[in-house]
Amino acid sequence: MEKKPLNLLKPKPATPASGPASTQGLSQSGGRRVLADSFVTLHFKISLADADGVVADTFEGKPATLQLGTGQFSQPLEHCLVGVAEGESIDVVVEPDSAYGIRNPELVQVILRSVLDEHGEPGAEWVPGDVVEFPAPNGGTYAGVLKNIDATRAVFDFNHPLAGQRLRLQARVIGVL
């Protein structure tokens, strides 16, 4: 098991959020509109809609450039960008079931401390908040957040850290290819 941070911009598959839709590549003003497979340069901010907390913010730095539909950005958040024209801005709230899903209490699991120590890095010190990667039976990995630990057991939450959260997406599209 290896400690590794989660990529917060790649959630589990979810039902797409509602957002602007367009089947045309140009806006009425002649600017290009975002399509489902566009390359997009934009500033964006993802924050918690119901509490303080910024997940990602490019407004203070360089804009991001990404290709929609390739997993570089969460599918439900991408869906909110489809139809937005160059120069336009959006400010939308995405509900939990359309973002990173609803929290599943069955994904909070107890693991024996002996198992954690046996498969972890020798001498590793575990503290609540650590993100730990576990091997999956299919050869992949999955990550859990350590919630608490004592001499005999560790409790991990395998829900995405943003599961159950309403998210606010603010974005300004700079360019579309």
Image: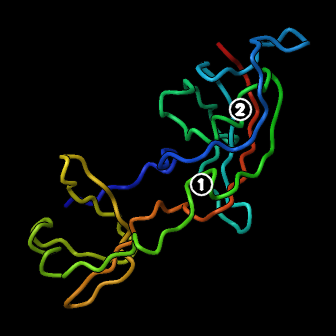
Residue with the most extreme top position: 30
Of residues 104 and 159, the one nearer the viewer is 104
Q: Is residue 101 above or below residue 39?
A: below
Residue type, numbered disc 1: Val
Q: Is residue 13 above or below residue 124?
A: above
- In the image, residue 1 lies at what x, y percent? 19, 61
Secondary structure under the numbered disc 1 in the rendered image: strand
Q: CA distance from mark 1 to mark 2?
A: 18 Å
Q: Residue at point 64% right, 57% down?
A: 54
Residue type, numbered disc 2: Leu
Q: Residue at point 47% right, 60% down?
A: 160
Q: Is residue 161 above or below residue 127?
A: above
Q: Nearer the viewer, mark 1 or mark 2?
A: 2
Answer few, some or many: residues within 10 Å of disc 2's Cα (few below 14, many 20 plus, some between 14 and 19). many
- In the image, residue 159 lies at what x, y percent? 45, 64
Secondary structure under the numbered disc 2 in the rendered image: helix
Answer few, some or many: residues within 10 Å of disc 1's Cα (few below 14, many 20 plus, some between 14 and 19). some
Query: Is 21 placed left or right of 105 in the picture?
Result: right
Query: Is 72 placed left or right of 39 in the picture?
Result: left
Q: Quadrant of residue 84?
A: top right
The circle on residue 129 is none
Mark earlier in primary sequence (1, 2): 1
Q: Quadrant of residue 62?
A: top right
Q: Quadrant of the C terminus?
A: top right
Q: Residue beneath label 1, please?
A: 55
Q: Is residue 30 above or below residue 46?
A: above
Q: Residue beneath label 2, please?
A: 81
- In the image, residue 152 lies at what x, y percent? 19, 90
Q: Quadrant of residue 68?
A: top right
